[in-house]
Amino acid sequence: MEPILEVNNLTMDFGGLRALDRIDIDVKEGEIVALIGPNGAGKTTFFNCITGIHPPTKGEMVIRRPPKRNPQRLNGLKPNHVTERGLARTFQNIRLFPSMTVLENVMIGRHCRLRAGIAGAIFRNRATRQEEKQLVRDSYGVLEKIGLTRYVNELAMNLPYGEQRRLEIARAMATDPFLLLLDEPAAGMNPRETESLDELIVKIRDEEQISILLIEHDMKLVMSLSDRIFVVDYGKKIAEGTPEEIRNNPAVIKAYLGEEVDA
Amino acid sequence: MLTFTEIKRSFLVSVWFMFLTFPIMVIRVNTIENVVIWRWKNMLFVGAGSFVLSFVWRFLMRRKEVGSKDAEAGGTSKSIFQRFMEEKRLYYPALGAISVIVVLFPLVFSMYQVNIMISGLTYVMLGLGLNIVIGLAGLLDLGYVAFYAVGAYAYALLNYHFGVSFWIALPIGAGLAALFGIILGFPVLRLRGDYLAIVTLGFGEIIRLILENWNEFSFGPSGIANIPRPAIPGIEFTLHQNTIFIYYLVVLLVVFTIFVVNRLQDSRIGRAWIALREDEVACQAMGIDKTKTKLTAFALGATWAGMAGVVFAGKTTFINPASFTIWESVMILCIVVLGGMGSILGVVVGAGFLILIPEYFRAFSEYRMLAFGAALILMMVFRPGGIVSGMRKTYQFEGIENGEASDKKA
Amino acid sequence: MVSPAPRFLAAPRNVAQRNGLDSMDWEYTAELFLGGLTRGSIYALIALGYTMVYGIIELINFAHGEIYMIGAFTGLIVTGVLTMMGWNEVAILVIAATVAMIYSSCYGYTIEKIAYKPIRNAPRLSALISAIGMSLFLQNYVLLAQTSDFLPFPALIPEIGWWKPYSHIISSAEIVLIITTAVVMILLNFLIKFTRIGKAMRATSQDRKMAMLTGVDINGVISMTFIVGSATAALGGVLIASHIGQINFYIGFIAGIKAFVAAVLGGIGSVPGAVLGSLVLGWTESFFTGYVSSDYEDVFAFIFLVCILIFRPAGILGRSDTEKV
């Protein structure tokens, strides 16, 4: 089966600094793929390239959205167009809309799936009213899936840290993605929260048929979740394979320089 | 709390300010006749004033610190206005009472009062328009007055050259202003925050300077006179009747503005503006077209300025570039900031404070701009949310029944 | 409310007569060049303070133009008092400039404490609005305490006798201005590069939190920046006022805006950049008014500003920084 995300030869230069060097990565439908590597290895840059925040210097990025699987290039698309095509992401340093409520945050996620324009907003015609109702229903549905309904009218900034991370995932899911990009979803979480995150990610994959590509430092989480793992260091891909293969890969162990890679 | 240290601190502050303001407040020189006037009385005023104010300042500072600790502890304090809005039993009768006052106003009060009200209401329109750009979309536009000028000149020039009536000029002025909003919005899309403020300020000044210098087009600094007042065709108004007519017209326009802005902020586009204000990167990553969202904010904000401009030209019958300086922009900014960014009621309250109070306290009119400046600083330091702070409506979800989303805006 | 802004600087003396003539006239070109140099030096004295403040706390200090204006007013007041007492011109100039610098520094220090320090951690929009408020306040403070009229400012910089024949090309006052700017720039550069406080300033501008953790007294550094920047502006205020010959409460606004253009053009946050940007702006303005039109001088400056900010927001010597995502 052809991969739903295929990145070939991706290179990104910042001035003289090569942040990414000929990276090849692919994600197949229904997979949970992890991207790991030491700090500053270029993982977040990789996300930023795919999602259109930084235009890459070189390389090809192609998606094939199920079920039709027409190949579409991501190169040169603006972030909002990437999201429209079915890639949604979260951020390493949480970027919610702090003074909007939890529900409103999720409603923003649905923005690109709605049609209402200025005239619709002013005259609030039948179609707009219906759309708004559907929007609330859908958004609440997403919150139910993620388990955030008890905070529905709370301002995002008043949420506990772990729940903010979950809200970011909810917001991303509201955009109807086929592939979810999670940037360090477990950062700053306590072990209990991490465990429930683990369950949540699996649930998203199994019940929503959304494939997942995640960046993560928590090796326990990565090893238990991932179908495949890519390892980058200094902008280069140094290994790929199943958790088992990665665990025993000498190059990976070296890259982490004594950092324990036990699960 | 009047401990010795407190008094000593205030005393030092007052000495410092007496020193600081000494040359400018006390001495006045005339270099031609070589005369120096010493005004020692002023020094006393400054000393006494700063002594008292330093107590007030420290008191407010302490209160602010306590307040922020409360907020951290999770306590949400609601403003009087917010509680008032939530209490339906009070809200509707109050709204009714205000409507009655507004409708009866010109029948009870003098022409002079009605004129003040008209200008106050015009500023409500301007404030509501700018509120879209600053309060909702978070784009600090310091050249807003340019769109006001576009509207006013559109009516004046169209009337001068082609005899276009007020009623036709009103939508044209609004449309032209919106168009200008988009034209000026395009180049500044990439800029954020303070650079945006400076560039829009630059645009505002460019338009004013062009109006001032391009005599063939705009008649330069002397401006355009004899602009007809709005009227109903076929009916002869006296000046008095006409003013009352304009008053009701402006009231209708304000109601219309409130209606539209209210709908806009509760819509898909309104949410996108707020999201843009909160976090531009995340907003784009959630699939919102930044360019389109910013441009609609500029255009829709400018529309109201254009309309207000046409009304202004029709009301005063004379316009010149001096009415459209940067300080006019700052004044509208004051209205929005003072009232509470992002809140409709805030803008109305802000316009009330800034336009009506100085008008009714004529004796202090010279101190008006001084007070505005101070108000902007004090607001930012002590109450950044504005008088009506925390008033942004959030969508309140109340459950789903029978597959129907039942909801309510609160 | 406010009378239309008077032109910040007069157009080159003889544009009107020259317009019809052969514009290749080298003397005229040289005059425009030197006029531009003077203009540039004037902008630079104000732009330096802008750029330093922005470099440290990333705030467009709208009130900076007003500090310059207050410097000029203080200078005028001191001059008035001393003239009445019959002092010598040069002595008056030195004392007026010194007092103006001291007072403006105090104003800068106080302004920072009142309007910026309490909201240092608030959104940038708040600080900017506060700065606009401060600018409005100071303008009207001087307007009310002094006058709204233009006040004549005596020419304090004496004409040097043997230079007289050449003074139609560049007057000795202009030479003093240019030299002062150069000296101030060199001193500031030295201050930032080689002194302890300069090091602390650079650290603060790079990362305020980190600087604080390593023991830099942030409040002290920020205050110091305001003091130095304000003193520079005041020095400019006195010299420029004496060169142009009149002041009012509104001179700070246009001067502030133009200096800001210059600072941005050079790369805001950079001291040599501010001077370079000022010179470029001075020359382009001078040649524009000299060869094209003097009516649209200010329009030109604004268009220049808009173009720079849109096409090269980092300026000539600035480095562009992208937000970390």
Image (tube, coloured by chain):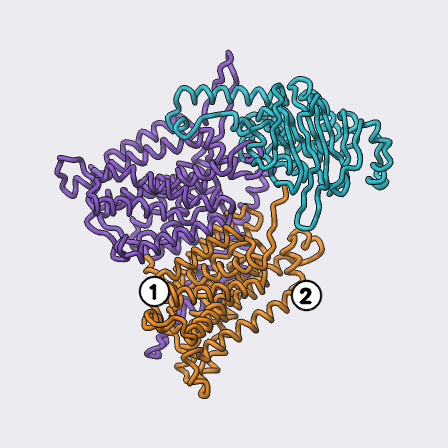
Type of the residue with mark 1 = Ser
Q: Nearer the viewer, residue C324 or B48?
A: C324
Give the chain ID for the purple colour.
B
The residue that label 1 is drawn on is: C148
Real-space Cα separation, disc 2 to disc 1, in angstroms: 43 Å
**Is residue A119 shown above or below A42?**
above
Type of the residue with mark 2 = Arg
Residue C196 image label? 2
Residue at 50% across, 64% down: C280
Q: Residue C274, how many percent across, how many down?
A: 54, 63
Q: In the shown orientation, is residue A153 left or right of residue C134? A: right
Residue at 82% across, 31% down: A246
State the SS at label 2.
Answer: helix
- What crowding class fits label 1: few (fewer than 14 Cα within 10 Å), some (14-19), or many (20 or more)? some
N-term-proximal mark, 2 vs 1: 1
Residue B41 visible in the shown view: no
